[in-house]
Amino acid sequence: MFDTVIRNGTVVTADEVFPADVGIVGERIAALGEALEGTTEIDARGCYVLPGGIDPHVHLQMPQGAFVSADDFASGTAAAALGGTTTVIDFVEPAPEEPLLAAFEKRRAQADGRVAVDYGLHMTIPAWHAGQPAVLNALDAVVAAGMPSFKLYMAYAGLHLDDVQLYRAMAAIAKAGGLPIVHCENGPLCDALRADALSHGETSPIHHAFTRPPRQEAEAVGRAIDVAALAGAPLYVVHISCAEALARVQDARAGGEDVYGETCPQYLFLNAQLLDQPGGERLICAPPLREPEDNEALWEGLSGGDVDVLSTDHCPFTAAEKAGHAAFTTIPGGVPSIEARLSLAHTFGQPRGMSLPRWVEVCCSNPARIFGLERKGRVIPGFDADLVVFDPERWVRIEAGQTLHERVDWSPYEGLHVQGWPRDVFSRGRAVVRDGAFVGQAGWGQFVARGGS
Ligand code: MN
């Protein structure tokens, strides 16, 4: 007798699709089989049973200048759960001179007791820290605290690393058994192009895209790949936005290099022309939106192999916070999508050749494997009972504040009809969503210490 049995569903993993009951004991998956019996039984006939989604790139209650992203750890993780995501990985962003582990404790204090599902943290190494040998020599302690992934920025004044800092940080991360995850844009070049645009009176949102062109992103991706190789480090390229940048990743992988690629829904569904339309300022994010051909190149990478992960880079700001700026340069950057990720990929991936196992691989299993979530991302006995009963026949019209529960008054996907939505969601054996309604509890989620290589 199991505590809970999810009966009659079709289990979808990164490898296969098969009918099975899933038995849960306590917080773990205990068995897969036929006619399992449980104290509680959930009928999943007609539904898929997936490992819980893992979104390894989110920014909850993140300060950005005078603004703070609109979802906090409670609202953002509840929205994640409703969308079938049972683990998120957010970021520690240390202030100049702040010890990395002190910043970690502060970030945990914001999340613990509030999160509805499990979470991990990446450690950012900002420019000040990257210049301190004592900081770089002590990354073992960060890995030991459960953060084997380190965010490095090649853009944004005050944050971005120059090539020497990038090399030294990557070498130190590799030595500690960690993974550098890198925002690849040529920050100084973009800053110059932005200043030029402003000096010519080019202040509208479309100039955000013009001043961060694809070639500079591709240059930064290529440089990150080369510097990582020189430093003996693996590399994870976050939020690839365009075909030219993806091509650099493909070349490196074809040469056998240890390079991972990630993209996000905004780079699959949206294009730069939208920046010129009413409300275009809401869609400012970096890298910027690109062209329809870039969308298709990224779909192909996601369906076919060279893009390993679909994350969201969820970083919501309200319509009012985005509006009314004299120039695009002061608009807070980032878009929401923490809740609709699985359904968007399910609906629009399959017509582009993404199989059901590949869908699970890029949304669940690959992020678990790449980021050291050792008991998540698979439906096998002994793993955490993070499970999604996904109804592939349920149609949902995306509406901010209605069908979505992100704490933001707009969605880039407003009005879009998606096929398939999570019906029931379990986090370590506990129901957090039942019949599409949130039944979880702030504080159920825990910090997950991840393993290094
Ligand atoms: Mn980000």
Image (cartoon, rainbow, N blue to C red):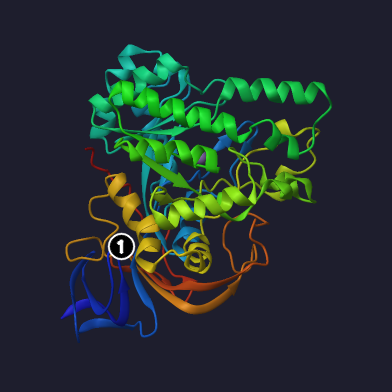
What's under tag 1, amino acid-wise?
Answer: Ala
Q: Is residue 201 above or below residue 108?
A: above
Q: Is residue 301 above or below residue 138?
A: below
Dividing the picture into quadrants, the one containing residue 252 is: top left
The verdict on label 1 being within 8 Å of ligand 1 is no
Foreground: 240 or 42?
240
Foreground: 379 or 82?
379
Q: Is residue 416 left or right of residue 346?
A: right
Specify few, some or many for label 1: CA neighbours under 10 Å numbering under 14, 14-19, or 20 or more. many
Is residue 234 in view from this perspective? yes
Q: Position of residue 103 (x, y in %)?
A: 40, 29
* The C terminus, quarter of image: top left
Q: Is residue 74 above or below residue 432?
A: above
Q: Identify the residue position indicated by label 1 in the image.
A: 14
Dividing the picture into quadrants, the one containing residue 354 is: bottom left
* The N terminus, quarter of image: bottom left
Foreground: 305 or 168?
305
Q: Position of residue 207 (x, y in %)?
A: 74, 35
Q: Is residue 73 above or below residue 172?
A: below
Instruction: Name the residue rendered at 48%, 41% in the picture.
Output: 246
Q: Position of residue 125 (x, y in %)?
A: 41, 25
Tell me the SS state at disc 1: loop
Instruction: Name the residue rendered at 52%, 55% in the picture.
Output: 75
Furthest residue to the right?
201
Q: Position of residue 329 (x, y in %)?
A: 71, 31
